[in-house]
Each structure stands twice: as structure tokens, then as C-alpha cells.
Amino acid sequence: MNSFALINLIHSDPLARHLERDFIIRRGTTRENLKLLLSEQTDYSMISIVDYFKHINELDLVYGPTITGKIHSMSNLLISRGLDPYPGMNIAVTSETETTAFYLREIVDEMYPGTKLIRSKRSTAEELLSEEDFALVIGNNALKIYETDFRIVFDVTKMFSKIFDLYSIYAVTAMRKDSGLEGSIKGKFEVEEWEKKELVDQISSKYGISGNILANYFSAISYDFDTVIEKQIKIIKEMYDEKKENIFTK
């Protein structure tokens, strides 16, 4: 049985339950999953799309699950304590992502010129907003914001889609070019909506997040991989290549 490294965030919980029928499942951060893949400790890995771009000469894209926001995602948020966004603002960026920072960079360059994205070693809303007036928060920490008084300035996925008419593809499945593995797991990763709904109560208890929030969240994210996603990955790669040296403020 092949091994599969999934991301240790809520969005992958239904995926883990589904894939354990056919794979030995491991869970880690996208960076940990990348290391496992490159060191031949796992067969397939879900890694950030930015890490895939960085290692495109070593890795192949697999016809497997992605983490994609098509209209909105609920878990990639620009927040503040009440301030409106403005050109030249400073944004503290969670330590958990470079991919969402890239999408945010594209947005602010269009809408708020001069904005600085500042890497942080922290990840929660409270921690990040202690550093700057605005913060980029993702994943589980972002979902917790809906039950707080922090202001959601915008959903990064929704704004990126509105400006560029593209999906926000956050993670992809990859394998090593020299692995000799099958490059498609079509038919094994398609999680049905009822499977997500069935897990809502269990995941709500596990993470302490409202079931209503989770139900909306699982409706917002997609695991799809198809020709549309494949084409958009190529477009996003071109955008990333133009912007990669200027995502963060040096």
C-alpha cells in the first residue's frame, strides 16, 4: 500500500478518512510533507502550490486532490481590529503560509499600492495583530475568527477571484519524478458532500469550532483536479514567477 502525506489542517480531515481506504496516511504541515516527499519517506504528498513551483524540476503533479477555493474559502483572511484597508498598510503574515501571501500580494498591488507584507513567526490572530494593524491568518486559526470581534477585511480567495477571475489553488498532490509511481489516483480521492457533512459534528468537537461554520467551510473548499484546475495552475505559475522575489518586504 502506498503512503500519502496530507496536510494537518481541518480541510484535510474528510480527505484523510476517505483516502485511508487505499493509502497509509500521514499528516504534517505542507513544508513537512515536502521534506517527506523529497527524502523518499512518502509516495505522494499534498504540498503548497508555491513549494511545487519551487521544486518543479524534481516533482510531478499528480491527478489527485487539491485544496482549492473557487469563489471563497473562509480560511484565508485579511483581518484587523476594525481599521479599513489603505495603500501603504503593514500586514503581519502568518508563519503558516507563503502561498496565501502570494495571492494577497497580487491583490494589494492592484488595490492598495505600497502595502508591506511582513513575515511573522506567529500564527494566531491575536499574536499577529500585536505586531501590525492588519494580519493575514489562514487555516484553523482563520476559522476561529468568525466567533470573535476581529474585523474580516476580506476573504483572500474571494478577492483574488473577483480581480483575476481565477481560483485560489492552495495545495496540490505531487510525487517525485523518479518514483515510478502512477501519476493519477483518479477515482480514489473524490470525497462526496455527504462524507463531509457526516464528519461535521466530530470535527466541531475536536477543534471547538461551530458546526455551522464547518458546514459552510466544507461547502466552500474543493478537492477537485481537472483540466480547468490544470490550466489555472499554469497561469498562476506565470504570475508567481513574476512576483516571487517581491512577495514579502525585505
Image (spheres, rainbow, N blue to C red):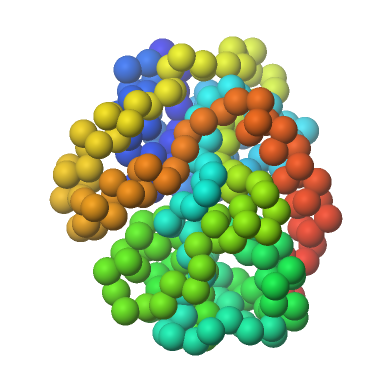
From what the image shows, is residue 234 above or below residue 69? Answer: above
**Number of numbered discs on residues:** 0
Residue 130 position in % (x across, y down)? 44, 85
Quadrant in which the N terminus appears: top left
Quadrant in which the C terminus appears: bottom right
User: Is residue 98 visible in this depiction of the protein?
Assistant: no
Residue 157 position in % (x across, y down)? 55, 55
Q: Quadrant of residue 52?
A: top right
Horizontal side of 166 relative to 206 (left or right) equals: right
Residue 79 position in % (x across, y down)? 47, 74
User: Is residue 140 visible in this depiction of the protein?
Assistant: yes
Horizontal side of 206 relative to 157 (left or right) equals: left
Q: Who's the residue at 60% across and 30% down the image?
A: 174
Residue 233 position in % (x across, y down)? 69, 38
Horizontal side of 127 relative to 200 (left or right) equals: right
From what the image shows, is residue 188 above or below residue 237? Answer: above
Towards the viewer: 33 or 52: 52
Q: Who's the residue at 61% across and 17% down the image?
A: 183
Q: Quadrant of residue 63?
A: top right
Towards the viewer: 187 or 155: 155
